[in-house]
Image (spheres, helix red, strand yellow):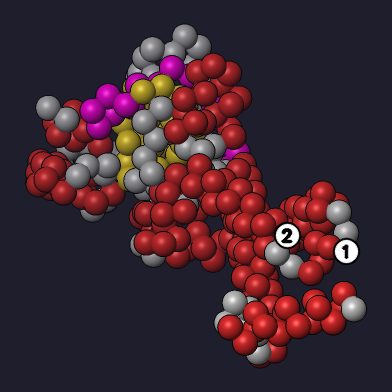
Amino acid sequence: MEDKELENSIMGKIKTGQIKIKSRYIFLAEKLGLGTAFALSVLLSILLFNLILFYLKETDNLKYLSFGKFGVFAFLESFPYLLVVAFVLLIGLSGYLITKSDVSYKKPFGYMAAGLAILIMVVGAILTYTNLARGFEALSQRGNMPVRMFLKPLTDMRNSGVAGIVFEAGDGYLILETTHGLRNVNIVGIDAVPQIDKGQFVIAVGSQNGRDFDAQKIKIINRQDIPAIDRGIEFKFGPFVQKDLNEDNVKSLPPDMFYFNKQEQDCVKNCFNTNLGPKECFAACNK
């Protein structure tokens, strides 16, 4: 009797429009849409985790921590915040989509969330052995704006740190080939400066002083330790990165090889006409 009353009640609500019956095709479409959104969020999470690992492994970011308290600001300045935030949001979205699926009724959510996180990290770590992240790095170097936005710390100038190849070493200063061009690094404020020769790869922490960089600490490192920076320098200088490049003649380098803005390029061009060396050119154009 109760079943009959329930049936009549439901049928009455259907007839009056209080309950609407969905087509099975609508149910199927919703299920496919949920599955597609879940798969896409997982794939993007894997990609972002791979890019985070790539960034921390191949750039100068973690190397600044080796300077102790002197390197904290450089580390924080160069940290890939956007990548990490986007990754966390996508992980959260994936977990939310799980709760909306049929699977959530079959197994505890905690186990599924933990399994999903492990899957994403394992697959993301495996992808570090491929050239996937290198492809995104190349897109960023060529100016692809969406990719460049996520890898922004890779292409940004550091105000608290600098890494590059020694182009010229002099009394109290270094001229470094960096991903943004030649930079003048003042090392007079460092207590114990190691023997630094041309062609060596160095990393320093300190502060920006106009177009120059005032170093507080400096270390010699292997260029293989931060290969993304090494590739960025090669991309910037191209055929001008040569071991036998004569640093005494600034005419060996075009103006855009110096770290100056467009308004200051005229000053650098004058260095060519007067045959000034890089150090003298920085001094003249920083006034």
Percent from the top left, x then y, of residue 100?
70, 64
In the image, residue 52 above or below residue 186: below
Which segment is the magenta one? 208-223
Q: Looking at the rendering, which quadrant does residue 5 occupy?
A: bottom right
SS at badge 2: helix
Mark identifier at residue 106: 1
N-terminal label among 2 and 1: 2
Quadrant that contains the C terminus: top left
Q: Is residue 187 left or right of residue 54?
A: left
Please name the residue shown 58% across and 18% down the image: 68
Identify residue type, mark 1.
Answer: Lys
Residue under the point 77% across and 57% down: 116
Residue at coordinates 63% horizontally, 45% vertically from top-left? Answer: 57
Residue 99: mark in rendering = 2
Residue 18 seen in the current view: yes
Q: Judge whether 132 appears above or below 88 on screen.
A: below
Image x and y of residue 281, in percent = 19, 35
